[in-house]
Image (spheres, rainbow, N blue to C red):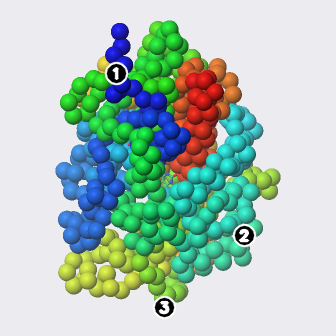
Amino acid sequence: MINMSEENTFDAIVVGSGISGGWAAKELTEAGLKTIVLERGRNVEHIKDYPTANTHPWEFKNRSHLNKKEISERPIQSSHCDDTNKHFFVKDIEHPYIEEKPFKWIRGYQVGGRSLTWGRQCYRWSDLDFEANKKDGYGIDWPIRYKDLEKWYDYVEQYVGISGDYDNLPHLPDGVFLPPIPMNVIEKHLKKCLDEKYTDRKVITGRVANLTEFKKGRGKCVYRNMCSRGCLFSGYFSSNSSTLKDAKITGNLTIRPYSIVKEVIYDEDKKRAIGVVVIDKETKEELRFFSKIIFLNASTIATTAILLNSISKSFPEGLGNSSGQLGHNLMDHVINEGTYGIHEGFIDKYYEGRSPGTIYIPRFQNVSKKTKNKEFLRGYGIQGKGERENWRSKSSPGIGLELKKALQYPGKWKISLGGRGEVLPYFENKISLDFDKKDQWGIPLVKINFKYGDNEIAMMKHMTKASEEILLNSGFNKVQSYRSSPTPGSAVHEMGTARMGRNPESSVLNKHNQMHDVKNVFITDGSCMTSSGCQNPSLTYMALTARACNYAVNQIKKGRL
Ligand SMILES: Cc1cc2nc3c(=O)[nH]c(=O)nc-3n(C[C@H](O)[C@H](O)[C@H](O)COP(=O)(O)OP(=O)(O)OC[C@H]3O[C@@H](n4cnc5c(N)ncnc54)[C@H](O)[C@@H]3O)c2cc1C
Ligand code: SF4
């Protein structure tokens, strides 16, 4: 007999409090559902728990680099964090996983998840992305198109606050933007050169979730570019600064940190999920929580791991896995190490502060018949930034007087470019569980088996060559590239493993992000993605989450859930 007491029974359970979980919490609580957010990490209170937000560069030991011990505790995460923000990334030694092939699983286990440390780049998808699988035959067709998501992109953007320009590009639809963060002189120069020299590619202002205008309870960005430490002005979007704050205001939210969701409980008689099993991170006690609906938002790999660990008579291979697709079709974006070029001009031009703004060269390959590429399918975009070399930078050379001088005198103008390309959904790229190896909470370790295919390698080479050509054609010299691709996972855009689709035989979720097999379970983090596009994906997770919450609430009202 299951003990369903009032204090552990809710209308909705949301697992995870990162970007997508924060949205689920806001939408469900605002619709009047008593909701518990179960978060495996510690609590992070907005502003109060940003210990380095005001620390000056010289106050960090080792100029903010991690020391050897810190790196040895974080062999994976250390490529993405430093002394300024390490507290928002996990220690790998405490949270191990098995790399059957090298894959960086970058994680932040805390209230807010990786919404605290993300790069804030936000781009809509278009039908070029939603129709790609159907057209070239890789993966399965998406069950939705741009028109299904358009109003939800509008809805989410209005709330998040995304600064950007209106660029009128059909394959990168414009959104609801705040005024753009202005380009600096070298970025404008690159834009002008591309406008003059190319018909297929252009430089646009990066669209970022940094406020250029005040927004309800949130201040304007004051250009410190220290976002990944947490923002004291709420100048960028995070769950902590925005969605969780508004969910709390409803009075319908309970957040329980240190709650590691181990599995979803499936009731064989009712043929539905009735709750989740949680291990308290601190006491290791096993607890149960119950609800009408469950939103899994623990992030791509973690959500699927929970499902693979949810074994019942009806689902011996993991909850909702009648298709056999759960865990498969893992994707990330393929990126290159980057290309750099120096410009000898504009030395009388400076910039003030540290803008978190960027530039973006939207996808320009395989966009039309004219831009068809024979070497690879689909495409990539290039992100970039222009700045004066070694100015106010932790990599400024020297110590003492030499360092003081280096900090005072800006170097030449430099542009850095980095591509992000679409990875095809391959069935062989997957996650699974090792039931013989468990973590300290008795939960099976995740195994990741992922490899780029020939398409991704060809794309990566192309993005490097194209970046070099763009800079050389724009008057830059000393143009250099690292000719390798970082370890998969490095883009931190892991997607897939519980994909949406029209057919329950080949997909896990339907067009409402609802499990085909278990109708009261919804997944709206990156696990649901049927293909990967080349745009940074979090904006699409947010739009899908808001849309799925709206559907779930309506279904409850109609008595169907
Ligand atoms: C340095 C960096 C830069 C990035 N830049 C961008 C960018 O510019 N644009 C972009 O679109 N994306 C970017 N990303 C990716 C972005 O952060 C993720 O896509 C996004 O956070 C995913 O949201 P999520 O809700 O799925 O997961 P997360 O934000 O990771 O949240 C998941 C939450 O679930 C919790 N959790 C995990 N397992 C369990 C469990 N078993 N039980 C309970 N809770 C659990 C975690 O602790 C975490 O709080 C970046 C990421 C990083 C690290
Ligand atoms: S750059 Fe803007 S959003 Fe980021 S920490 Fe500074 S003020 Fe806040």
**Residue 489 image position (x, y, % from top left):** 45, 44
Looking at the image, residue 185 lies above or below residue 523: below
**Residue 497 image position (x, y, % from top left):** 52, 31
Mark 3 nearby-residue class (10 Å; few <14, some 14–19, many ≥20): few
Mark 2 nearby-residue class (10 Å; few <14, some 14–19, many ≥20): few
Sequence-wise, which precedes: disc 2 or disc 1? 1
Q: Which mark is residue 5?
A: 1
Q: What residue did someone put label 3 on? A: 348
Looking at the picture, tell me which residue is in the foreground, 37 or 541. 37
In the image, what residue occupies the spot 33% across and 32% down?
Answer: 260
Per the image, label 3 sits on a secondary structure element best described as loop
Figure quadrant, ligand 2: bottom left
Compute the Cα span from label 2 to label 1: 66 Å
Q: What residue did someone put label 2 on? A: 198
Foreground mark, 2 or 1? 1
Horizontal side, residue 456 vs residue 4: left or right: right
Which image quadrant is residue 85 in?
Answer: bottom left
Compute the Cα span from label 2 to label 3: 28 Å
Q: Is residue 162 visible?
A: yes
**Residue 459 image position (x, y, % from top left):** 60, 50
In the image, what residue occupies the spot 75% across and 67% down?
Answer: 199
